[in-house]
């Protein structure tokens, strides 16, 4: 919990990872390129006081994660969103066993999501069923630009992907987190395009599609899709640190999301260990849209509370103490805009 100026905020970090990019786990040059790119994001977008050494960055371990999030970072609950990247790392990039063990030991603080790849065919469907039973999955994290043999990406609207979503529906895995954001070397930028979100969200209206990184650098495309598809949500991983390096750019990102998507479908994420949550929470609570950006309304305290934790808590059935909830009138869903109100004419009238 974070408290400032008499207001308390329930914090859910909706996108974290526990990874291992130490030399003994790197399979080839691409694994080195990937973690180097991650570190560049970290070093270039963090305040100087928050920059880790490269050695610390390669592997954090569960003890440090618990300290960075729950002792120092104000976080009340966090959700693992692991990437596999088996073509680049011997044991995978996201550490399944260690992360799941932490979640089992701290069920009130951690939720473990897993991953699947539809290019694994029938065997992958069997594995998904086994993983759902073992991990008690409520959500999955998908990486559409991941390499797989000769393939350098896949689409959400592929026929095989649809078979996996149908199994998710059967198993009660309702939260589909998809990396649709900045590319990471050596992955291909176009494999992260947001266009396929529109198709699949229309066909699986009973699933939530959380677009991680809110489609950046394709924010406009994402917003036009999300305003039409009420089951599409925006994850702020990678967008958040621009609050430090480019606050006016961050104001445009959050302003556009609030205008198009609405306050009920935006989720805070530190993207740990790319960044740590403490300074991001502090900066966001203090943040306000610059007065000269008159096309955007000021961000209210209630909106900040929803984004920082209440939205993700609702999605994952995380219990929020009564004193940290909003009054019922504020918790009534005012968004997303319904399709009959989401046309060009109504947008101009807002």
Image (spheres, helix red, strand yellow):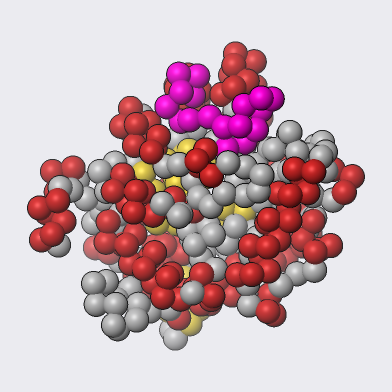
| Residue 296 image position (x, y, % from top left) | 27, 71
Instruction: Note whether 281 is above or below 157 in the view shown.
Output: below
Instruction: Note whether 56 is above or below 35 in the view shown.
Output: below
Q: Considering the image in quadrants, where does the C terminus appear? A: bottom left
Q: Is residue 147 magenta?
A: yes
Residue 275 showing in the rendered view: yes
**Among the 4 quarters of the image, the one containing residue 199:** top left
**Among the 4 quarters of the image, the one containing residue 203:** top left
Which residues lie in the magenta part?
Answer: 145-161
Residue 325 showing in the rendered view: no
Residue sticking out furthest to the bottom: 5
Could you tell whether 260 is left or right of 276 in the image?
left
Q: Considering the image in quadrants, where does the N terminus appear? A: bottom right
Could you tell whether 246 is left or right of 278 in the image?
left
Residue at horizontal 74 percent and vertical 49 percent from the top: 33
| Residue 205 image position (x, y, % from top left) | 32, 32
């Amino acid at each position: 919990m974070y408290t400032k100026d008499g207001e308390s905020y329930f914090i859910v970090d909706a996108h974290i990872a526990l990874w291992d990019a130490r030399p003994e786990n790197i399979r080839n040059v691409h694994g080195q390129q990937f973690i180097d790119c991650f570190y560049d994001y970290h070093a270039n977008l963090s305040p100087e006081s928050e920059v880790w050494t490269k050695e610390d960055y390669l592997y954090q371990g569960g003890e440090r994660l618990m300290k960075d999030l729950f002792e120092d970072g104000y976080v009340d609950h966090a959700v693992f969103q692991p990437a596999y990247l088996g073509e680049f790392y011997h044991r995978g990039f996201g550490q399944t066993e260690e992360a799941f063990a932490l979640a089992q030991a701290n069920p009130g603080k951690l939720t473990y999501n897993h991953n699947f790849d539809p290019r694994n065919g029938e065997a992958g469907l069997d594995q998904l069923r086994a993983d759902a039973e073992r991990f008690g999955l409520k959500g999955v994290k998908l990486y559409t630009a991941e390499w797989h043999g000769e393939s350098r990406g896949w689409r959400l609207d592929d026929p095989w992907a649809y078979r996996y979503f149908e199994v998710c529906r059967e198993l009660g895995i309702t939260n589909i987190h998809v990396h649709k954001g900045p590319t990471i070397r050596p992955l291909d930028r176009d494999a992260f395009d947001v266009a396929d979100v529109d198709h699949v969200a229309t066909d699986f209206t009973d699933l939530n599609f959380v677009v991680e990184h809110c489609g950046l650098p394709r924010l406009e495309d994402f917003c036009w899709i999300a305003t039409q598809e009420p089951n599409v949500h925006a994850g702020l991983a990678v967008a958040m640190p621009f609050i430090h390096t480019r606050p006016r750019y961050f104001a445009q990102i959050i302003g556009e999301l609030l205008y198009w998507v609405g306050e009920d479908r935006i989720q805070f994420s530190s993207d740990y260990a790319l960044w740590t949550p403490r300074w991001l929470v502090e900066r966001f609570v203090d943040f306000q849209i610059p007065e000269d950006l008159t096309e955007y309304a000021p961000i209210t305290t209630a909106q900040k509370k929803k984004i920082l934790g209440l939205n993700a808590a609702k999605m994952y059935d995380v219990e929020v103490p009564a004193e940290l909830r909003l009054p019922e009138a504020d918790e009534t869903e005012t968004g997303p805009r319904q399709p009959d109100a989401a046309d060009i004419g109504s947008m101009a009238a807002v």
